[in-house]
Image (cartoon, helix red, strand yellow):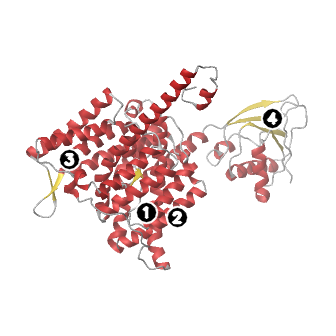
Amino acid sequence: MSLLDPESVLSRKHTLHTASRFSLQSIQQFGFQRAKTELLSGLTVAMALVPEAIAFAFVAGLTPLSGLYAAFIVGLVTAMFGGRPGMISGATGALAVVMVSLVANHGPEYLFATVVLMGLLQLLAGFLHLGKFIRLVPYPVMLGFVNGLAIVIFLAQFEQFRVPDASGGHAWLQGERLALMLGLAALTMVVTWGTGKLTKAVPAPLVGILVTTGVVLGFQLDVRNVGDLASIAGGLPSFHVPRVPLSFETLVIIFPHALILASIGLIESLLTMNLVAEITETRGKASKECLAQGSANFITGFFGGMGGCAMIGQSMINVESGGRTRLAGIAAALFLLSFILFASGLIEMIPLAALVGVMFMVVIGTFAWSSLRIIRKIPRSDAFVLVLVSGVTVATDLAIAVVIGVVVSTLVLAWKSSQTIHARVEITDAGEKIYLLDGPLFFGSVESFAALFAPREDPMEVIVDFLGTRILDHSALQAVDSLAEKYKRAGKNLHLRHLSPDCKALLEKAGDLVEINVIEDPHYGVAVDYGARFDT
């Protein structure tokens, strides 16, 4: 046990008073250090949230404050009540791209109503404990998600290398301006890397941002900063009910978008939760996270926010900066609000190159480089799923990529499992033929199961031993029923042996769907009548 564990302290009653006083001082010192780390980590995350929130708001066709308010409210609520302390939520690009057509065709108020409905759907998912199904996502899909999102974050940074031109469009930086941007981004990366190697007392990304900002201001370098994107000055978000008609027609418009947004938001949040849990070697609570995300988006819709979900980039910044508790996420949200209210001028001075450098470090830390080493060693199907999910994440969006990855992985598993069922045949002294089954019996393996038997050639008494198999679905029930019919037509007696309780329950639930009368044998190896004869 740790000396800081209260139970451990109480168990050491025999220690001297001086030792107890030393332990108390240690606890107090630990509390201060942890609080400092969490607050500084929150400050770093808040700085990184600003340009992302603005950029995603522009993507969706909204004002910058819609993105900033969403980052503040969603970040605050999920930090306080979410299922994964240390995870950061806010406005994301995965959601913004879905919002574009709705805002363009119907306006921002319809989006705010959609975000409210999105929150309700996520709350429903939390109450129904649907978050537990995230455990069904295979590891290759998880790796593909991580790699794909790292690539998306990397590509998104190149938008900062474009500037408005005279024609009203955007042009790429060139010459000295491009070299300066790259140089400052590289400086931020080097400082961040070096600080992380030297000390954990302060978040390395924060030092990188401050050093690069100091260089730009000290040498008065002409580079783009946060203020060039948009002004972040504003007031407190104000409550208002979305101004849309309360009609069935409105529901028809917003429900499909709300369903897609809710699904994407939960999938990205739960996968990010698993990633952070793996890095920190802790466990998250999926249903609690669903409820927190739903509550956050429900509230955000009434305050002019664009909605949000977990952000893998900012979550990685927080984790790498030492943020482990709810304090870091709460601090990030409150710092972001203070930027809007009081410190917009200072934040707008931060060069974009510094934030690009931090995000490049996030990409390096997020990408599963080990997947490149193992891709030739793992099964080809897993390698294909990994690459497929990464590609679809980059080309479309996360939700589609994960669904495709899970479907493909399931089909591969079903195909492999269908090939594993087999039988060992024994002949008893009485002339009975016993089929000792091994492997799962389900829709994918019923054809292989049927091919194991030869009703016309078998003796009068045939026993099928299910000790090494399980009946998993209705297709399996029908396969057993069809086998019984074949032996019945051949004039043979078919017996079942060692059906497990769950198989028996499945047969009982089937009722009249199958015509099998099973007498279960609960005691393997006992000399009793194992047979269960099929009724005619």
The amino acid type found where label 2 is placed reads: Leu
Residue at which label 2 appears? 120
Residue at which label 1 appears? 300
Separation of disc 3 and disc 2 at Cα?
Answer: 39 Å
Q: Is residue 296 above or below residue 144?
A: below
Query: Closer to the observer: label 3 or label 2?
Result: 3
The amino acid type found where label 4 is placed reads: Lys
Classify mark 2: helix, strand or loop.
helix
Q: Is residue 317 visible?
A: no
For label 2, the crowd category at 10 Å Cα-Cα, with few meaning under 14, some 14 to 19 and many 20 or more, is: many
Q: Position of residue 115 (x, y in %)?
A: 44, 65
Determine which of the numbered discs, if any, sits on residue 433 in the image.
Answer: 4
* Marked residue nearer the N-terminal end (1 or 3): 1
Separation of disc 1 and disc 3 at Cα?
Answer: 29 Å
Classify mark 4: helix, strand or loop.
strand
* Marked residue nearer the N-terminal end (4 or 1): 1
Query: Closer to the observer: label 4 or label 1?
Result: 1
Q: Is residue 31 visible?
A: yes
Classify mark 3: helix, strand or loop.
loop
Separation of disc 2 and disc 4 at Cα?
Answer: 59 Å
